[in-house]
Amino acid sequence: MIRLIQAPSDTPLRIADIVGGHGVRRRLLALGFHKSDIIELDSRSIFRGPVLIKNLTSDTSVALGRGIAQKILVEIIDERK
Amino acid sequence: MTRENRYPDIVFIGQPNCGKSTLFNAIAGLKAQTSNFPGTTVKHTHSKVNVEGEVLNIIDLPGTYSLNPSDPAEKVVLTHLFSEKPDLIVNVLDASILGRSLELTLELIELEYPVVVALNMIDLAEKKGVEIDPKKLENLLGIPVIPTVASHGRGIKELLDASLQSLEKGLSVSHIKWSRDVEDKIEEMQDHLPEDFPIVGNKRFTAINMIAASKLLFDKMLRDINPSLKMNLDRVRSELETMHNAPAYEVIAAERHHLAFKIFEESSRVIRGKRISMLDRVDDVIMHPFLGYLILFGIFIGFFFVIFNIGSPLEELLLGPLDSFRVFLSLKLGEGVVFYLVDGLLQGIGGGVAIVLPYFIPLLFLMSFLEDVGYLARAGFLMDTFMHRIGLHGKSVSPFILGFGCNVPAIVSTRILESRRDRIITSLLIPFIPCSARTTIILALVAFYLGPFWALGFYLFNILLLGILGRVITLFFKTPSPGLILEIPSLKMPSLKNMMRNTYFQLRSFLKFAWPILIAGSVVLGLLQYFNFDKFINLVLSPLVEKGLGLPQELGVTLVFGFLRKELSLIMMLQALGVSYQDLMTIISREQLIVFTVFISFFIPCLSTVAILWKEIGKRVAFISMGLNTGVAIVLSLLVRLILVK
C-alpha cells in the first residue's frame, strides 16, 4: 500500500483506504469514491498544483489538493493478472 | 405563498452538472406563466407552468451529491425537502455516469416520496458506449424512468406526462432491500425509536440517517434529549462497525454504492471498450500542465478583445443618432423642466442601449460559453496553486469567474464552498472583480478613449490587486483552508441554444431590474439639475472629488449614484458634464479619466451586491466589504493621481 501522491501516473490503482477525517471521507464518498474502486492518477503539474484522479469504476474525475491525496492509500493493480 | 400552494409542487433534484437547470429552463422557459427569479433573490428558482391545463409549481434546487449535506448549497435542498414536503420529486440523472448518479436516487426512494427519474444526457451515455435500458431500470427501481436530452428538448413532453400521471395516480414508492445484516441493524434501530420521535420521511429513513449522521452535532443533541436512545444508537453503530470493519456511515454508503452499481450493471450494457473521443483529446490539452495555463491566459485576453472589438464599433454606431436626437430636443424644448426630464429619460434609455448593451451582451454570451462547456471547474483546477498563495483554493475560482459577469450570483455561488472561512474571504474579494457593469465602464471610457491596451493594463492591475488583497485578508483568519476536492465534469460540446437561452435570461433580468434604475437615476439627475440641487451635493463632496481626486466638481453627484448601479456613473457623467460622448475628452484629461475609472471600479459595491452580501454572509461582512472597497478606492485613486500627474 502506498500513498496516492506517490503512486505512478496513468496506472490502474485500487483504493485501499482513506485515512483522513470524517469530513474528507464523507465528501469523497459523496463524489463516488469508495474503497476498492479502480482509479488512475494524473499528477503532472508545473506549479505543484492539485492532482487529477479518474475513477474508472464510476467514470468520474475529481481534482484533489495534494494534502488530500496524501490521505488516500492505494495499491497498484498488477496488470499481468 | 398560500395562493401558490394550491398547485402541486414538483421539485427538481439531481447531482451537480447533471443538466438539471437546463432541463428546468427548457420546461419553465417554454411555458412559464410567471417570472423566473434570478439567483439574486431566492435560494431556489421556481416557476409556474401550465401543462395541458394543469398548473404546476416547479422548483429547481441546487445540485447535491447526497442527502447528507456538506456545503450550504446542499443544505438548501434538505431544508426544502423536509419543510415543504413536495408532491413529486423529479430526480435528474446524468446517464453518462449512471452508477454514481443512482446513489442519490436510492436515497430519494428511501424517503418514500413519489419520484420520477429523468434519465438525462442519454445521448452522452450512448457516445461513451453505454447503452441503458430505461424499462429495465424502471423495473429495478420501481419508479417511472424517462430518457431525456434536455439541451435538445428531447423527452420533456414524456417527462411532464409521466409527472402528471404520477400526481394523479399517487405514486407508491418502496425502498429496495440491502444486505441482510445491515437491514437487521436498521430494523433494530427503528424499533428503538420512541413514539414521539420526530420522523423524517419514514421510520426506516430516520433510523438510517441517525446511524449515518455526523457524530459531532447530532449525537451531542441526542445525548441531552434521550440518553437511552443514544446508547442504543451507539451500540448499533459499533456492531455495524465491527461486522464490516469500517465506520457506520461508510457501511451505509457502501450499501447504497453496491446496490447502485448492481442496478447499473443489470440495466446497462457497455458496448465499446474505452474509446478516446475528440473531446477527451481537447480536454487533455486544456488540462495540460503547461498548455493549460497558456490557454487560460489566451481565453482571458481573447475575451477582452472580442468584447471590445464588437462593443466599440456598435457603441459608436448607436451614439450618433442618439446625440443628434438630443440636439434636436434641446432646440425644440428650450431650457425648461420638460427638457431636463426628457433629456434624463433619453440619457437613461439611450445610454443603456448605446453604451451598456454593446459590451454587456457579448460578455454574457462568452461567459455562458465557459459555463456551458464546463470550463469553470477546469480553471479551478489550473488556478488552485495560485489560489493557495492567497489562502484559498481552486474551488473559489468558479465564483470569481462568475463575478466577471455579475457579482451578485457570484456571491450566491460561494455556497459551494464547504468552509465558512473560505466563503467570507471569497465574498469579500468578489466585489473587487470587474463585473460586466465595470467592464463596460473600463471599455467605454479607458479603451474607447485611450486605447485597448490601457484597458487591458487596468484589468491586469485589477487581478494583481485581487491577489494582494486576498493575501492581506487571509492574515485575519487563523484556520487554514481545507484542501481541494472538486469534481471535474466531463467536457461538453457547447450548445448554441443553451448559450443563447442563458444570455437571454440574464439580459432579461438586466432589462427588468437594472435598466429601470439607470433610467430613473438619469431622470432624477435631470430634476436635480433643474432645481440646482446637484450643485449642493457636488459642493459637499468637493473636498474628496475636486481636492482629493482632482476631478471636475460636477462628477460628485455621479459617484453617489454609482452606488445604485455602476453603469449609472458612466451615463450620468456625460449628463452631469453636459457634453456629448464624442466631446468628453475636451473637458477632462486622460489622467482624470483614469482616476475616475479607478475610483468607480473599486468604490463601494453596488446596492444589489451589498444586499446579497448582507443576506448570504451577514451584516458584518457587508459592512466590512463597504468599508474595504471605499477605503481601497480612495487610496488607489489618490495614488494613481499622484503617479500620473506627478
Image (cartoon, rainbow, N blue to C red):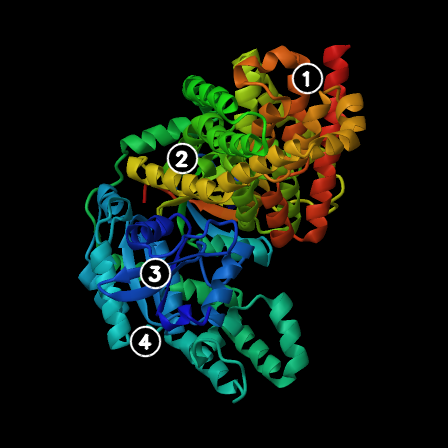
| Badge 1 density bin: few <14, some 14–19, many ≥20, Cα 10 Å | many
Are marks 4 and 3 in one subunit? yes
Q: Chain of mark 3?
A: B
Q: Nearer the viewer, mark 4 or mark 3?
A: 3
Are marks 2 and 3 in one subunit? no
On screen, residue B638 above or below B245 = above
State the CA–CA distance, disc 2 to disc 3.
34 Å
Element under disc 1: helix
* Whether label 3 touches label 1, CB < 8 Å: no
Name which residue lies at 52% across and 85% down: B193
Tag of residue B193: none
Q: Earlier in the sequence, mark 3 or mark 1?
A: 3
Residue denoted by label 1: B592
State the CA–CA distance, disc 1 to disc 2.
56 Å
Tag of residue B91: 3
Q: Chain of mark 2?
A: A
On screen, residue B418 above or below B626 = below
* Whether label 2 touches label 3, CB < 8 Å: no
Name which residue lies at 53% across and 65% down: B247
Residue denoted by label 2: A10
| Badge 3 density bin: few <14, some 14–19, many ≥20, Cα 10 Å | many
State the CA–CA distance, disc 3 to disc 1.
56 Å
Element under disc 4: loop
Residue B30 seen by the camera: yes
Q: Nearer the viewer, mark 3 or mark 1?
A: 1
Q: Quadrant of the C terminus of chain B?
A: top right
Q: Quadrant of residue B157?
A: bottom left
* Camera-side residue of A13 and B469: B469
Q: Nearer the viewer, mark 2 or mark 4?
A: 4
